[in-house]
Image: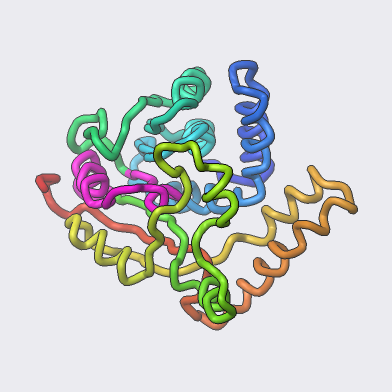
Amino acid sequence: MQEKRPTLDGLEQVLELIASDPRIPPNFSGWIRASLRSGGGKNRVLRYILDHARSGGASPRILDVGAQFASLAVYAVKLGCHAAAVDYGPAAKTFQKVATDHGVDYKECDVGAEALPYPDNQFDFVTYTDVMEHHSFSPKRVLQEIYRVLIPGGRVIVVTPNHASIYNRLKLLFGGSVNDDFDYFFDTCADERIYEGHHREYTRGELRAALGRAQFQVLECRTFEQDLIPLLHYLRRHRTRGEIFPESRDLLLCALGEIWALLHLPLGRWIWAVGEKTGDGKT
């Protein structure tokens, strides 16, 4: 495989490719393009996969669980990987058609009730990012399914909000809530049968325990911040000077996050964890 490195320009091209597809509903296009703001997370995952892929020229086989519009999987294909993806919901059929045309094996799957639609020992890496916190159920069976479809020595990459971040601590200290916006939850989502926001966030210790109880050997479990560079990149490309002011809070938080990182304090907004499958896949 000819190795390439993920870049923000490359990710932006992938997002534009998906957002401009005529099959994508217009109300989704802006959301897809705006995800560049936090694009450093996807590129972080892809860099890890390229850096830890097996030597010998074989292309890494990747499964993205909770893929949404499949930008990570589509970009992985363009970087020379074999990529599959699963998600579930009203838009999944549309995303499936678009992603399939770009080389992704995208399948619908309700991970809360169904087994992953792949055989044992199939993938080198499974990405499970920005998903756990949205489950209205325990992620145990999902992690067990991920363990099953990974090859021995394969790795799961988990990214999820840090419930013990300094931002949550400060909110509670001053009488605020660490849950999703109350007006959005109470009024905007009043007619939803199942709320699609965050149901449960995790601490580092809880995420480490979850991986361990699903038989993974935990290789990494640390906090990090949303990268400042992707946010600046997005603002330069998609906002006028007058429109940047509402984003100043995120800019400040990202800048503060650099301090926690330099001091090696576990206060960041996100948890990054990597688990390795060391057994034969039987759970």
Magenta residue check for 150: yes
Residue 261 seen from this side: no
Describe residue 233's horizontal placement relative to residue 161 as left or right: right
Quick one: quadrant of the N terminus? top left
Q: Considering depth in this image, is 271 or 1 the residue closer to the camera?
A: 271
Q: Residue at x 43, y 35 (%)?
A: 81
Percent of width and height locating residue 219: 31, 64
Q: Which residue is drawn at 52% across and 53% down?
A: 44
Residue 245 seen from this side: yes
Q: Is residue 282 above or below residue 268?
A: above
Q: In this view, does 100 lie above or below 156?
A: above
Q: Which residue is drawn at 19% across and 55% down?
A: 214
Q: Which residue is drawn at 66% across and 68% down?
A: 253
Percent of width and height locating residue 31: 64, 38
Describe residue 185's horizontal placement relative to residue 30 as left or right: left
- Give the quarter of the image for residue 175: bottom right
- What range of the chain is rendered magenta? 125-154
Q: Considering depth in this image, is 25 or 84 the residue closer to the camera?
A: 25
Q: Considering depth in this image, is 123 or 196 the residue closer to the camera?
A: 196
